[in-house]
Image: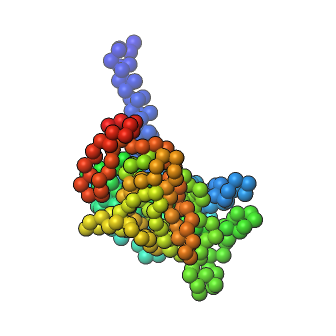
Amino acid sequence: MPTRRDFLMQGAAITAALALPKRLYAATSEFQSLDARTASVQLAPEGYPKTEIWGYGGAMPGPQMRLQQGARLQRRFMNALPQASTVHWHGVRIDNAMDGVAGLTQPAVEPGQSFDYDFIAPDAGTYWYHAHNRSTEQVARGLYGALIVEESEPPDLDREEVLILDDWLLDPEMAQIVPDFTSRHDRGHAGRRGNFIATNGRHDLSLEVRQHERLRLRLVNAANARIFVLSLHGMEGWTVALDGMPLPRPEPLAEALILGPGQRADLIVDVTAAPEETAHLVRLDDQEAASQVAFTVTGKASTTLPGCTGRAATQSGDGGDRPR
Ligand SMILES: [Cu+2]
């Protein structure tokens, strides 16, 4: 007759056997997966067909990655695209082996295959990741996302927003991506310029803010060729970092900010527009101003902001309802 001890031992053995495949699985799945695949998204306004894109996680932009300075990022890239691809971590100082440049630092990852990216992010800042095989096609189809490396002592802000600016070349009837990525005309002119401009995949991105709120706007230009010329309306702002590098001192954004393809800029902005008004990140196209992002002012924040440096956070006493 088995003793209680035998039974327990047997139970332990069974548990161990059951645990074995699970443990093996766990050991190989430490990496979060980052898959690239085709997807349909509503890019053009409602009423138009959905646009077929290529996206990380089937989304555009892909998932926002956020980690602390000095932390480790591990992603298993799984390629479910009809083309070989890689992931490049734009601007991050990492080993060549992890830099994701097909044909230079690694072979392109074939459809159905995977590659493990594993690196430490040494510098805080605004970065982005994107495909780096046939980039003119793959980035234009939507393969990118933001990579935010947070500083250990963040500036005194109410909140931040990551804004990825892009333009898309869509056929005007079916709203599908024009599949000629090597047009001689484009090459001989200003590159592949889109006819449909979006922020975070939305042509009408609108965010709610409060008057006197201080935001960090992390801007990324993910377009192939478009140079964004930007200014602020209803907000006062400073450029505090360019391409992930902090500036020696904040620079007042008095005139236009020019953001070329691949570039990033960190702005700190104070909402000056009054409640019920709308502030804007403004895009200047050939002297014409258009709203790139609308900021609807819904109330007042409870502090006044004396300036970008040395924020004293004095109480304004104007009846703001934000918790202090
Ligand atoms: Cu890049």
Q: Is residue 108 left or right of residue 71?
A: right
Q: Position of residue 50 (x, y in %)?
A: 69, 56
Tell me if residue 179 comes above or below residue 1 in the rendering: below
Q: Is residue 305 left or right of residue 59?
A: left
Can you name the residue that lies furthest to the top here? Answer: 1
Residue under the point 54% across and 52% down? 206
Can you name the residue that lies furthest to the front here? Answer: 318
Give the quarter of the figure containing the C terminus: top left
Q: Is residue 218 left or right of residue 113?
A: left
Tell me if residue 285 comes above or below residue 23 in the rendering: below
Do we see residue 9 in this rendering?
yes
Instruction: Give 270 or 115, whichever is nearer the viewer.
Output: 270
Instruction: Give 110 or 156, whichever is nearer the viewer.
Output: 156
Q: Position of residue 105 (x, y in %)?
A: 41, 72
> How many marks overall?
0
Color style of the picture: rainbow
Residue under the point 55% across and 75% down? 287
Residue under the point 42% across and 29% down? 14
Can you name the residue that lies furthest to the right here? Answer: 173
Give the quarter of the figure containing the N terminus: top left
Instruction: Give 270 or 86, whichever is nearer the viewer.
Output: 270
Q: Position of residue 270 (x, y in %)?
A: 38, 54
Do we see residue 155 in this rendering?
no
Residue under the point 58% across and 67% down? 167
